[in-house]
Image (spheres, rainbow, N blue to C red):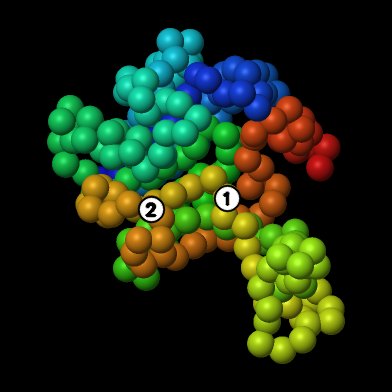
Amino acid sequence: MKNFAFIFARGGSKGLPGKNIKPLAGKPLLQYSVDTSLASPSIDKVFVSTDDVDIAKVAISSGAIVIDRPAELATDTSPEWLSWRHVIEWAEAHYGQFDGFVSLPATSPLRGVEDVEAAIEKRSQVNADICISVTPASRSPFFNMVKETSDGCVELVNKPESEVTRRQDAPEVFDITTVVYATTPTFVLDNYGLFSGKVTSIEVPKARAVDIDDIYDFRLAEAILQGGE
């Protein structure tokens, strides 16, 4: 199996300007994802898709291959799936066919090599189209999440088959994380969306599942890296 890792890092972050190369505990945020990719035994090549010159420089110095991301795929509203298709087509044109597509967003710097390897193995093991990463959810739609009804009242987002009076009795639910997505080029090119096929998952502890969107996420990741969790 030939697996290529792809890291997607736009230059136009609004929640935390410049976050993809913002120094986190001594090195640019992007470099964490590149370093983990390069250290993963199952990954053959590492690519960074970006529209930003400064991000590209960090990617190259970290050891990744840069793919220029078209402007139309680098906006706040650009579907990530189209960026996936773009890098697959680019990589195949420049480096030939490959078997496994692994997306490792730059915003999850705390992932471990074990997470990448586990996702690749799990997808193959259960013959799934894609393996996503999840982490235990802090809240449950079966117990303490509500939505407003048309008459101004509220009701549970999801109603379980039997009444749940304790959080511990609610069905276990998970949050999807951006730690790792392992799939195949064929699945991405022939479908549109994570749940278009057979989906499996690996569970990642919260300490490795931080997804940096704003300064508070950034500070949390920094605290964990510095041993302050």
- Left or right placement of residue 61 versus residue 223 in this view: left
The quadrant of the rendering that contains the C terminus is top right
Q: Amino acid at mark 2?
A: Gly
Could you say where residue 58 lies in the image, as x and y percent from the top left?
48, 15
Could you say where residue 127 lies in the image, as x and y percent from the top left?
32, 68
- Left or right placement of residue 121 versus residue 201 in this view: left
Residue in the picture at 41% in, 61% down: 195
Q: Residue furthest bottom?
A: 162
Q: Is residue 29 above or below residue 5?
A: above
**Looking at the image, which is closer to me, 144 or 150?**
150
Could you say where residue 3 lies in the image, as x and y percent from the top left?
30, 45
Could you say where residue 227 lies in the image, as x and y percent from the top left?
79, 37
Question: Does the rendering let one see residue 119?
Answer: yes
Q: Is residue 40 above or below residue 153?
A: above
Residue in the picture at 54% in, 46% down: 179
Q: Is residue 45 above or below residue 54?
A: below
Sooner in the amino-acid sequence: mark 2 or mark 1: 1
| SS category of the residue bearing label 1 | strand
Q: Which class describes the residues within 10 Å of circle 1: few (<14), some (14-19), or many (20+)?
A: many
Residue in the picture at 35% in, 35% down: 83
- Left or right placement of residue 107 versus residue 227 in this view: left
Q: Amino acid at mark 1?
A: Thr
| SS category of the residue bearing label 2 | loop
Query: Which of label 2 and label 1 is nearer to you?
Result: 2
Q: How many marks?
A: 2
Question: Does the rendering let one see residue 66?
Answer: no
Query: Pointer 2: what residue?
Result: 193
**Looking at the image, which is closer to me, 164 or 42?**
164
Query: Pointer 1: what residue?
Result: 177
